[in-house]
Each structure stands twice: as C-alpha cells, then as structure tokens.
Image (spheres, rainbow, N blue to C red):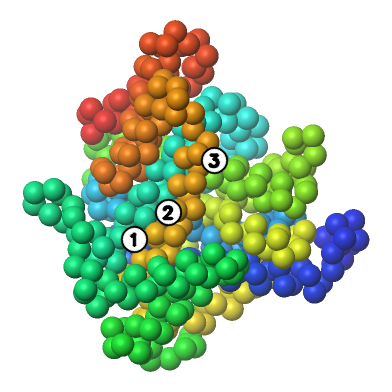
Amino acid sequence: MKNYFRFEERNTNYRTETLAGLTTFLAMAYILFVNPQILSDAGMDMNAVFSATAIAAAIGTAVMALWGKYPIALAPGMGLNAFFAYTVVIGMGIDWEIALFGVFMSGIIMILITLFKIREVIINAIPAELKYAAASGIGLYIAFIGMQNAGIVVPDESTYVTLGNMTSPTTLLAVFGLVVTTIFLVLGARGGIFYGIILTAVAGIITGLVDMPSAIVDTIPSLAPTFGAAFTGLMEVEWTAALTMQLIVVILTFLFVDFFDTAGTLYAVATQAGFVKNNRLPNAGRALLSDASATSVGAVLGTSTTTAFVESTSGVAAGGRTGFTSLVTAVLFLVSLFFSPLLAVVTEAVTAAALIIVGVLMASALRLIEWDKLEIALPSFLTVVAMPLTYSIANGIALGFMFYPITMLLKGEGKSVHPIMYVLFFVFAGYIFFL
C-alpha cells in the first residue's frame, strides 16, 4: 500500500493520510444532508437520495484515490443540485427522471472530451472572466436559496422580495446557525459548515423547533425509488422539439459548470499540495476521468452531478498528499450510510447557513473579473446577476455567453473571440428567445 501510493516519495505516512482523510470528510459531510433536502424539492425520495449521495461520493472518491491517486474527494456538487431541482425540474417543468438522464449524458460527454483531449480547446475557448462570473453567480444563487429557506427573504407583491419576519423562531434558528458557522470558519475549523449544522440541529431540538430523531443509526435506506430512473423515465415522457432543446441546454449547462468546477478544484488542490510543475499537472487525465465517471455513476444511482470538492484542500492542509487520503474519505462516506435517521433533524432552517456560507465562498471569484473593461464587465455582470434574479443558472450563463461576443465585436476585438463562443451565442439565443 505504501509503495502503491508512493508514501516515501511524497514524505507522508498512514497516520497523516488518515487524519487528512477524516479532515476532508468533516469539511464536506454537510452535503449528505443538504443534497437530499434540495433534491427532495424536485420530488425525489429524500432517503433514497441520501443513500445515492453517500454511495456516489464513496465510489467517485475511491476511483480518484485508486486510479487518479490524488487527495481529492468527490460528492454531488452544490450549485448543480440547486440547478437540477429549482431550474430544471421546477422551473422548466422537466421530470426529475429526465433531468437525471441529462446529468448522465453530461458525464458521458465529459469522459469523451477527456479521452479525445478536447479539454484544452474548450478551456481556451471560454474566457476566464465568464468562468469566474459563472462561479460567482452560482454562489449568489445558492445564498439566495439559503436566505429563502431561512425566511430572511420572502415574496412581496410590490417589490417581488423583501426582508422576512426576523423574529420568527425558525428564522432565528437559521440566523443562529449562520452565526455559529461563521465563528467556526473564522477560527479556522476545517469542518466548520458541518459543525454548524450539528449545533443548529441541537439548538432546534432543545427549543422544540426540530423533532428529536427516532434513532441515530439504522439500516441503509433503499435506492429503489431513484436507482436507474434516469433511463426508465425516457420511456414515459412525450418527447417534443421544445423538450429536446431544453434537455440539450440542460446537458450543456451541467457539462459547463462541472467541467470548469472540476478543472479549477483539481488545480487548486494540486497547487496547494505542490504537485504542479512548470504549470503542468501530472496525471491530470486520470483525475478528470475519475470525476466524469463519478457523474455518470451518480446519475444512475439517483443524484445530481458528482464532482470534485474544493473542501479537499482542508485535507491537503492537514498533510494529505496521496490517494490514501481520498480512500479514507471514501470509507467514511460508506460508514455514513447508517446515519440516515439524522435526516429528520436537518430541516431547511438548519441547512440555510450552509447554503449562505457556500455562496459566500463561491462569490469570491468576483475579485478576478476586470470590472474596468466594460466589454468584459457587462457580460460578466449579466451572468452573475441573472442567476439569482431569474432563479436559473442556465439563464445567467445564456445571457453572459450571448453578450460577450457582442461587446467584443463592438470593441473591435471580435477576432479574439473563439469560434466556439459564436456557436454558443446562437445556441443560447435559441434557448432564450424560443424556449
């Protein structure tokens, strides 16, 4: 085992790698409770999604550990699960089974573009500013959902949204969660978000706002309600040209967000671990294939896109340098399958703080956009602001991708725009104006 993971070469040992794996797990364990809650809003069985989340995370992370050999953990990604539930299923009216098929296809396409080494072409085609804007916009979108779940933001007939009743018990519980989570993170606690959820749930139980769980440990929930639904749903839907076009846009959006989220996370973790040499990342193809495979496997199990988690940097900071770190994290995700009864205490008010904090972390990419250049600032701004205001990640990406070629042409820099961007202009224009 030591030789396989090259412990001596990377100056590490079993104790360090095990602690690093535990640190990574604690930093991202919140997804076990947040993901089922979000996807249940799309009509999916919460218990089945819990199992799908844990198993998809375990499989994806294990593949990354044993084949990619990187200390990177995977799980259903934040932002993509919100897009799945609120934009695709609720907003577009697409059945969640068909949406799962869209996730599956995005994973297959990811595998193909990685195998045929088209990855670099796509990365170079889309300007960095739009990538930053997309990440930041998703952050605002997630935070907006978190504030809604907390009751901090509520509907209003005159202004569309307004400040909620801040004296409401459930809103106060959510605010408590936001405060304690912030304290954990500011003090440098690796699993701050997870600890915040635990303390908020305990506070909810003590105050009577959250029901006491019937048990702590139980049998593993069945996958039957979601397993394979990505394919059985294809036979039950009435296909139309509009639905087909919608599904294409959905697949492209899943692909786009996952593609750059994975690339960015992989590079960030590898840089922190000291793996990047001469601006090149060794074994990057295997790492990306591990991620793409996890997406397709997760869709079959019954969850939204499975992707690399930037929380893996916490494990690297704790000393993790090999795939053994990820292997430990994968085992812990399997163990977590027995703790499904805790889903009962993780209400929307309990997880609201996690959504808001994750939104803050994602929005940090705003600082990388060149706001003094209007030809860049306008499409970037539209990408960012349209996501929360139209309640759709796809709408934000579509508007940004449409306006970027226009502003660059007006600036006289149309030749610097990659042809792929012009193709995407027409794809997203058709989506906006005809769907």
Quadrant of the image occupied by residue 26: bottom right
- Quickly name the residue at label 2: 359
Separation of marks 2 and 3 at Cα, in angstroms = 17 Å
Residue 305 versus residue 272: which sits nearer the camera? 272
Q: Would you say the residues marked 1 and 3 are in contact, meaning their CB atoms lie under 8 Å apart?
A: no
Query: Does residue 58 lie above or below 336 as drawn?
Result: above
Q: Amino acid at mark 2?
A: Gly
Q: Amino acid at mark 3?
A: Phe
Q: Amino acid at mark 1?
A: Gly
Q: Would you say the residues marked 1 and 2 are in contact, meaning their CB atoms lie under 8 Å apart?
A: yes
Specify whether residue 109 is in view.
Answer: no
* Label 2 CA crowd tier, 10 Å (few <14, some 14–19, many 20+): many
- Mark closer to the observer (1, 3): 1
Specify whether residue 173 is in view.
Answer: yes
- Mark closer to the observer (2, 3): 2
- Residue in the image at 21% along x and 74% along y: 168
> Dividing the image into 4 quarters, which one contains the C terminus?
top left
- Residue in the image at 49% along x and 58% along y: 76
Q: Position of residue 34 (x, y in %)?
A: 41, 67
Residue 105 versus residue 359: which sits nearer the camera? 359
> Element under label 1?
helix
Separation of marks 1 and 3 at Cα, in angstroms = 24 Å
Q: Position of residue 285 (x, y in %)?
A: 69, 42
Q: Earlier in the sequence, mark 2 or mark 3?
A: 3
Residue 72 versus residue 158: which sits nearer the camera? 158
- Quickly name the residue at label 1: 146
- Quickly name the residue at label 3: 260
Q: Position of residue 407 (x, y in %)?
A: 38, 17
